[in-house]
Image (cartoon, rainbow, N blue to C red):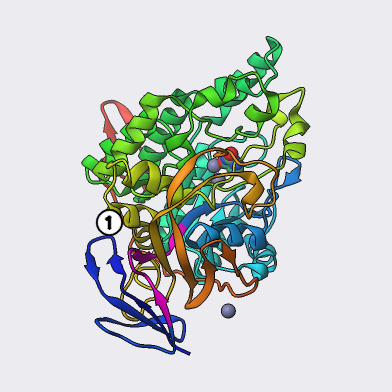
């Protein structure tokens, strides 16, 4: 059964033009004028765009003594409802656990996915086993490795471990990712705040100022450069981190920055209204910041110094958040956004003139597919590409509300935000999943997308060279060192 999307305007990262799209066998078979198919979908007044790709989600993830509440079923259903047709989730080995066992766990969780998906691998501990297994992980089609510079005592890796892992990534053609916050300073500030009687959720924000993010971003960039590696910085939330990325790119380094839709739109006053539940529901790392930082992130998306917009979707119920009632360091960190990323970015970005429609497609889909090495299978409206397509109605509106969301949690951080610009139809590999408010996500439809290694060699900032053989140093009157 072929399908044809008729009378729409195709919007890609680099072109806007009128054409019909014919879908056959899950892929885009033809793009042209006056096409016909077995089933026809009217896109009059709409934009036909590549489905959104969320490069950063945590579905059913064990974290801070609990599991994130949305699993691959509800998470990908929420994704589809908001026009996202692919998610990239993090395989998270327990410290000491085999990376390959972690992949098995994620393979089991993801059988319920209604959209295609792929994985990043987290390097949560270091040793010869991890070094060796990284090659097998790349062979499994996972060519991105995430490093937590925060969460001291659990997920955090130290600089020596990060350096070794980045060098290994460079050798394997893999791209390292970092959660950039100085975990030692965060731990110290948290203890001081608690000792001074600050145990509420607002103290979470006080414990993670922009300085700790900027410092860690600078450090990760220099370590990556010394390791001959490009770098991808997840959830860039502040000017200091953006500035470090901008400077490194200007010198020629391939470093990518990913703001979240939450940080672009929600600010630090969310923690200050005196309502414990309201603030705790917004506890995530890094925390929301002020307008100056938000302006910097928007500017980065406009100028291209920041390339993608993600969600870090990691949803917890109010009950789960209340684990930290007497101690903010025990509030599970994370917020949701999978269903809302595209409508909110369209409303606050495209409708306000900050982003063009083509830039919108680039930062929600095409740039992500390119950086993660799955273009043009994903992120494109081209003949032969997967038919992950949204028919976007720029006139449909709604008020975001937990009562009508697909996520299983009991609130929404964007509650009350009015959006204009929503999907009319969403197709995942050619199957219709969304018709306006009707959701027909099919758990199990999603497939794993394997990604090839890159040619990752990269050096732009440092002139340092690793010494791998004995070196002679002549010193007057002192015996020669080395051999
Ligand atoms: N930050 C969060 O807020 N949640 C999940 C992990 C992270 O880094
Ligand atoms: Zn993170
Ligand atoms: Zn994350
Ligand atoms: Zn199917």
Residue 100 visible within the image: yes
Query: Residue 414, relative to residue 17: is it above or below?
Result: above
Residue in the image at 65% along x and 71% along y: 443
* Span colored in magenta: 40-53
Q: Position of residue 297 (x, y in %)?
A: 35, 36
Residue in the image at 30% along x and 85% along y: 35
Secondary structure at badge 1 equals helix
Q: Nearer the viewer, residue 16 or 14?
A: 16
Q: Quadrant of the C terminus?
A: top left
Q: Position of residue 229 (x, y in %)?
A: 36, 51
Query: Residue 453, relative to residue 257: is it above or below?
Result: below
Extreme residue in the top direction: 196
Q: Residues within 10 Å of mark 1 (few under 14, many from 20)?
A: some
Residue 305 visible within the image: no
Was residue 375 drawn as part of the magenta stretch in this picture?
A: no
Task: Answer left or right for 158 relative to 226.
Answer: right
Q: Which residue is mark 1?
A: 358
Query: Residue 382, relative to residue 228: is it above or below?
Result: below
Q: Position of residue 470 (x, y in %)?
A: 36, 46
Task: Answer left or right for 156 relative to 41.
Answer: right
Residue in the image at 44% along x and 71% along y: 388
Q: Quadrant of ligand 4?
A: bottom right
Task: Answer left or right for 147 relative to 462.
Answer: right
Q: Nearer the viewer, residue 341 or 207?
A: 341
> Magenta part mainly helix, strand or loop?
strand
Residue in the image at 36% along x and 38% along y: 222
**Residue 389 appears in which quarter of the rendering?**
bottom left
Q: Position of residue 329 (x, y in %)?
A: 68, 28
**Residue 321 appears in which quarter of the rendering?**
top right
Was residue 51 drawn as part of the magenta stretch in this picture?
A: yes
């Amino acid at each position: 059964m072929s399908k044809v999307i008729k009378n729409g305007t195709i919007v890609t990262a680099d072109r806007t033009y009128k054409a019909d799209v014919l879908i056959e066998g899950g892929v885009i078979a033809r793009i042209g004028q006056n096409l016909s198919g077995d089933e026809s979908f009217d896109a009059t007044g709409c934009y036909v765009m590549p489905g959104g790709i969320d490069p950063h989600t945590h579905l059913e993830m064990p974290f801070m003594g609990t599991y994130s509440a949305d699993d691959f079923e509800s998470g990908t259903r929420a994704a589809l409802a908001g026009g996202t047709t692919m998610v990239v989730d993090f395989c998270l080995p327990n410290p000491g656990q085999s990376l390959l066992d972690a992949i098995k766990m994620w393979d089991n969780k993801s059988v319920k996915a209604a959209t295609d998906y792929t994985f990043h691998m987290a390097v949560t501990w270091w040793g010869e086993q991890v070094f060796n297994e990284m090659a097998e992980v790349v062979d499994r089609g996972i060519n991105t490795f995430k490093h937590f510079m925060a969460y001291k005592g659990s997920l955090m890796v130290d600089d020596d471990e990060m350096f070794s892992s980045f060098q290994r990534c460079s050798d394997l053609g893999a791209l390292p990712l970092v959660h950039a916050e100085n975990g030692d300073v965060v731990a110290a500030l948290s203890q001081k705040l608690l000792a001074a009687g600050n145990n509420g959720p607002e103290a979470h924000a006080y414990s993670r100022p922009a300085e700790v993010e900027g410092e860690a971003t600078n450090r990760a960039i220099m370590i990556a450069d010394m390791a001959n590696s490009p770098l991808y910085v997840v959830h860039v939330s502040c000017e200091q981190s953006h500035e470090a990325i901008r400077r490194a790119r200007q010198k020629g380094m391939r470093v990518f920055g990913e703001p979240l839709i939450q940080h672009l739109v929600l600010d630090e006053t969310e923690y200050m209204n005196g309502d414990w539940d309201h603030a705790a529901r917004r506890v995530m790392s890094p925390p929301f910041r002020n307008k100056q930082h938000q302006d910097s992130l928007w500017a980065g998306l406009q100028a291209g110094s920041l390339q993608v917009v993600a969600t870090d979707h990691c949803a917890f119920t109010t009950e789960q958040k209340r684990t930290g009632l007497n101690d903010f360091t025990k509030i599970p960190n994370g917020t949701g956004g999978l269903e809302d990323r595209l409508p909110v970015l369209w409303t606050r970005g495209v409708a306000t003139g900050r982003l063009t429609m083509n830039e919108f497609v680039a930062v929600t889909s095409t740039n992500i597919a390119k950086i993660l090495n799955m273009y043009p299978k994903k992120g494109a409206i081209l003949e032969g590409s997967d038919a992950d397509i949204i028919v976007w109605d720029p006139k449909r509106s709604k008020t975001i509300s937990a009562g009508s969301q697909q996520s299983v949690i009991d609130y929404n951080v964007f509650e009350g935000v009015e959006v204009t610009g929503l999907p009319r139809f969403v197709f995942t590999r050619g199957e219709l999943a969304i018709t306006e408010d009707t959701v027909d996500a099919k758990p199990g439809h999603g497939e794993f997308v394997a990604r090839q290694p890159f040619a990752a060699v990269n050096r732009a900032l440092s002139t340092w060279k690793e010494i791998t053989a004995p070196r002679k140093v002549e010193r007057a009157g002192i015996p020669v060192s080395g051999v």
